Amino acid sequence: MLEKISTRAAYGEALLEYGIPNERVYALEADVAGCTMSGVFGEACPERFFEIGIAEANMIAMGAGFAANGKIPVCHAFGLFTAGRAYDQIRNSVAYPKLNVKIVGTNVGLTVGEDGPTHQCIEDLALMRVVPNMVVLSPCDGYETKQAVKAMLEYEGPVFMRTGRPAVETVTNRIQDYHFQIGKGITLAEGNDVTIIATGLMVQEALKASDLLKEKEIYARVINIHTIKPIDREIIIRAARETKAIVTAEEHNIIGGLGSAVAEVICEECLVPLEYVGVQDKFGHSGEAWEVMQAYGLTAEHIAEKAIRAVSRKEKALR
Amino acid sequence: MEAEKIRELKLQAAKTRKVTLEAIRTANSGHIGGSFSIVELLTILYFDKMNVNERNPHMENRDRFILSKGHCCPAVYATLAYRGFFPLEDMRGFRKLKGYLSGHMEMNHIPGVDMSTGSLGQGLSVGAGMALAAKCDQKDYRVFVVVGDGETQEGQNWEAAMAAGNYALDNLICIVDNNKLQLDGNCEEIMSPYPLDQKFKAFNWNVILCDGHSMQSLSDAIDQASERNGHPTAIIMDTVKGKGVSVFENQIRFHGGRPTEEEYKIAFQELDRAITDLEG
């Protein structure tokens, strides 16, 4: 049995591990420390933890003030209330002056489940991706999240990282010499019939889909894109050239996120059939997390269906 | 404050107004009204009160300055240029593709600018962050933030005021430029932000009222605000939008509008006369 841990829980452990020894690191929190897991850091290091209250815009801009004084502030809230509510503060007070502010938005996507559409953030990757100077991270499991946090704190400049609530299987630790590098995608499964490019907890679904596809003798390559921006153009172009069919999978609106980023690359470099798995430009719904995911078409089975479709489009084009 | 010092500062203010207006004229755009209402404040801060070093703009323990109403930057640029942070002739590049003096405050290319601003309502939060960071480092520098009266309609100011009061940031000084006008009209008619003093007091701030065009009044206010008593201080500064030029004063049009050639002529005549008079 593989270890299951949420990316937000792993985040909390990583902030403790990498944030405590670095005296420049400060945590700012908008009253959801128990969800973002910044509270773990706050307990261990109260002198570098500040509650800003339910005031995300103020928290982000205060973070800019910390960064302007040489500190590494990490601002915490839900995905929607960082990337969404504080968009202008992130754009104008963080990204434009290129201040070293880290923003961690948790409880993203449909898997916040019962809380429903007001909290099911499906726009954060799009919102953060279009802002110049931003690095956008979306790790898939606990193991990767920890390394992503280390890389984020070492990087000088604004970073947005999304983390999620549900416990997810750890899959990246199976790779020998796994090394997280901002902007470098990771191939988790080899195959040449189709490539599934996934991010966040859809990476695990993509791996399950590749198993389903094997039963139909379709061999899918699975690429984990943990950095939405800068996107790893090279790994996408290679996948397009070698497998000639691509499926993207993300717990996000199909508009503006990973799928769009991949489409931008292949349209410029190597046009091949592309299928999107994601939220089809509509709001979510309250419900048990994976029931909602099932209802919205965000499971391994849906990825496998889209992969089959991509392969048949490829074959049609070749005929 | 000595009479001679006051005369020097007033002369500097008159010169700053002239260079500000020249830059706006060269750019053929820019915000005269709100720039002119803060000139005495900028002059006394940069030529008397603030600990800054033009030879070392990033000096660690310098006092910080944030112009939250970032559109009034030409007056700050003119002040910084006179203070020696960059050459006065660079003002010709204000708002120009080939210049570096952006249409709103910009920190990475303009020596002496501590924060980029432009989107209203964010500067006081950034200032609170800087002030809290200073406390963490046990540094004793002050953080000055200039906010427009109309700008206080942005709710984020009050989030920042709450945080600054909560964290007892007595190294934070917010100066409200109470010129009573905003782009669309009188603040009171658009969306009254008043009473400002009671609002700040309610958030556990000290409040000082002063005349924003009197060097003595400003000097007293800033000195009083610099005393540390566990509360941030708001200086609500009574000012005239477009101050210093008869045709600009209290004219809503000059929030961001262009003067006519005739108005420019009058303005430069009046500013030149003010300079000559003060030079004695």
Image (cartoon, rainbow, N blue to C red):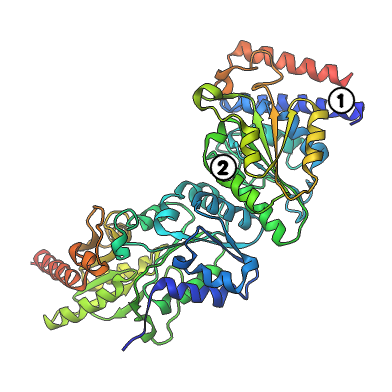
Kind of residue at disc 2: Trp
Residue B210, given in percent of the width and then of the height, sits at 75, 29
Residue B214, given in percent of the width and then of the height, sits at 79, 25
Q: Of residues B95 and B232, which is closer to you in this image?
A: B232
Subunit under mark 2: B
Question: Where does label 1 land, which residue?
Answer: B7
Residue B108: tell me if it is visible. no
Q: Quadrant of residue B28?
A: top right
Q: Quadrant of the C terminus of chain B?
A: top right
Kind of residue at disc 1: Arg
Indicate which disc residue B194 carries.
none
Identity of the residue drawn at 62% across and 24% down:
B33
Q: Does residue B113 lie above or below A124 as drawn? A: above
Indicate which disc residue B158 carries.
2
Q: Quadrant of the N terminus of chain B?
A: top right
Residue B142, given in percent of the width and then of the height, sits at 74, 48
Q: Quadrant of residue B272?
A: top right
Chain-order first, disc 2 or disc 1: 1
Residue A20: tell me if it is visible. yes
Relative to residue A33, is residue B67 drawn left or right? right
Q: Residues within 10 Å of mark 2 (few under 14, many from 20)?
A: many
Q: Of residues A282 and B116, which is closer to you in this image?
A: A282
Relative to residue A221, is residue A152 drawn left or right? right
Estimate the spatial distance between the alpha carbons at disc 2 and disc 1, rounded to whole Å: 37 Å
SS type, badge 1: helix
